[in-house]
Amino acid sequence: LLVTCGRSILYIDTGRKEITRSLVGHEGIVQQAKFFNDNDYIVSSSTDGTVRVWKSAEGIQECVYSTGVDEDFEFLHLIESGNNWKVMAASSDSVASWKLRIGTYDKQFNLPSSPMALISANKERSIAIVGTDRSMIEVDISTGKKKNLVKWPEGYMYQLCSSANRDKVAVSNYDHVWVYSVGSEPKELANFTESEEPKCLAFDPQNADLILVGTEAGNINVYSISRNERVKTFTSSDQVTTLLKS
């Protein structure tokens, strides 16, 4: 399991419940980290305004580039495209826009509301976005065409993730996690009250019934969707900001 914690990226052996490696170099909070090129490399983004590439096997930083993201941009997201990557900077200003960057400025699309969270969708060809209007939309990153997916009756959603085959999505606010099926008529599959503020979500790649919740308190809580309950907890030394499969 690869976890971002504060300014570090950690490898965790979930069987032994041990941290086996720590990647250090970012000067700000690491917001995203992702494997690419058959897991040979890791690309990460941070509030320090840089994207860094690491060799997975050695845990060595290979290169750094500045995203050029100014202070108006609150979070970044990474999309893998073959052996390359696309870095998206999401804005929550009055025009509610987001930019897709490939090293330098590439494209800009207007949104119906300010983005709160975003994920890759449809095999990296589109992006799903949760907005301040309490809806989730899908945006084709080539054409900018938008499609409505889910609308919530109340509350802002801050975290968002999808399952490997995109048939389920999980969202959270400051004290609750919901799991939905997606399709022509999405429906709620489970919901969990979380006493520790959720900072990131991930579906277990080995077990479709499990979802992992990284918290501000530094725990990784594992929930069963079918049983609608917590089944396990892992503990780290700092708040957990990203969860993804290795």
Image (spheres, helix red, strand yellow):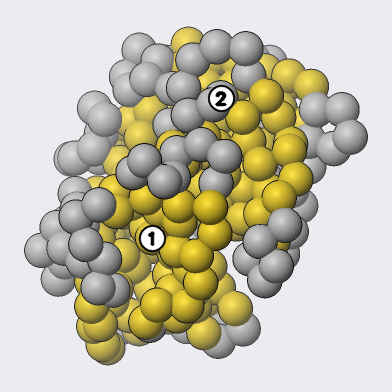
Q: Tell me the amino acid under the disc marked 1.
A: Ala
What label does residue 134 carry, if any? 2
Q: Position of residue 144 (x, y in %)?
A: 66, 61
Residue at (61% x, 29% y) in the render = 135
Q: Residues within 10 Å of mark 1 (few under 14, many from 20)?
A: many
Disc 2 to disc 1: CB gap under 8 Å: no
Residue occupying the point 66% across, 41% down:
137
Q: Give the x, y percent position of residue 123.
A: 72, 64
Specify the farthest residue to the front. 95
Q: Quadrant of the N terminus?
A: bottom left
User: In which quadrant of the rendered view does residue 27 lie?
Assistant: bottom left
**Is 191 left or right of 181, judged from the image as shown?**
left
Q: Is residue 79 above or below residue 235?
A: below
Task: Determine which residue is flagged by label 1.
Answer: 89
Rendering quarter of residue 142 = bottom right
Residue situated in front as seen by the camera: 94 or 199: 94
- Tag on residue 202? none
N-term-proximal mark, 2 vs 1:
1
Name the residue type under label 2: Arg
Residue furthest out toward the left: 27
Residue in the foreground of this view, choosing between 236 and 167: 167
Q: Measured along the vertical axis of the image, is residue 176 above or below residue 241?
A: above
Decide which of 48, 69 is in the foreground and name it: 69
* Residue 22 shows in the view: no
Name the residue rendered at 62%, 12% in the picture. Answer: 153
In the image, 214: left or right of 166? left
Query: Could you tell me which residue is drawn at 53 percent across and 52 percent down?
Result: 110
In the figure, residue 7 lies in which quadrant? Answer: bottom left
Helix, strand or loop at disc 2?
A: loop
